[in-house]
Image (cartoon, helix red, strand yellow):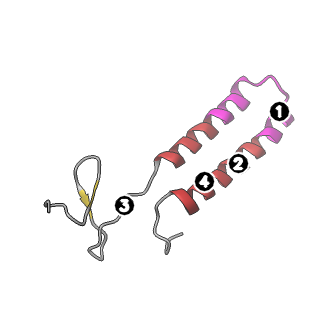
């Protein structure tokens, strides 16, 4: 057995141990960052480069925000690796 037996090792080589002493897997942050980056890109395109009137831009902003929140909720509940107690 190695020195990190029973512990989760991060890519940096550090062992992550929960307060109870059990090894835990780190939270997956990259999907949330990807969803937020895509939402930001969509909002920048909508407000910066779209040739619509202001009302059309506002109306298009709502589905962007709705799907962003929906995708973040799906990530949090199913793919984030947060403990079930937190979810």
Say whether disc 4 or disc 3 marks the residue closer to the N-terminus: 3
Q: Which mark is residue 72?
A: 4
For the residues carrying marks 2 and 3, which lies nearer the camera in this image?
3
- Rounded to the nearest angstrom, the CA distance separating label 3 from label 1 is 45 Å
Instruction: Assess whether residue 48 is covered by the magenta stretch.
Output: yes
Secondary structure under badge 3?
loop
Say whether disc 3 or disc 1 marks the residue closer to the N-terminus: 3
The residue under the point 45% across, 53% down is 28
Q: Mark 3 points at which residue?
A: 25
Number of residues whose C-alpha sits closer than 10 Å to that of mark 1, classed few (under 14), some (14–19) or many (20 or more): few
Cβ atoms under marks 2 and 3 closer than 8 Å: no
Residue lying farthest to the front in this orientation: 1
For the residues carrying marks 3 and 1, which lies nearer the camera in this image?
3
For the residues carrying marks 4 and 3, which lies nearer the camera in this image?
3
Residue 14 against residue 1 in the figure, above or below: above
Q: Quadrant of the N terminus?
A: bottom left
Q: Residues in magenta?
A: 41-60
The image shows residue 56 at horizontal and vertical percentages of 85, 34
Q: Mark 2 points at which residue?
A: 67
- Rounded to the nearest angstrom, the CA distance separating label 4 from label 3 is 19 Å
């Amino acid at each position: 057995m190695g020195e990190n037996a029973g512990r989760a090792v991060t890519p940096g080589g550090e062992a992550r141990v929960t307060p109870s002493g059990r090894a835990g897997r780190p939270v997956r942050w990259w999907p949330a960052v990807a969803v937020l980056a895509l939402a930001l890109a969509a909002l920048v395109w909508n407000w910066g480069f779209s040739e619509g009137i202001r009302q059309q831009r506002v109306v298009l902003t709502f589905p962007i925000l709705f799907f962003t929140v929906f995708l973040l909720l799906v990530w949090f509940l199913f793919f984030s690796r947060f403990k079930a107690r937190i979810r």
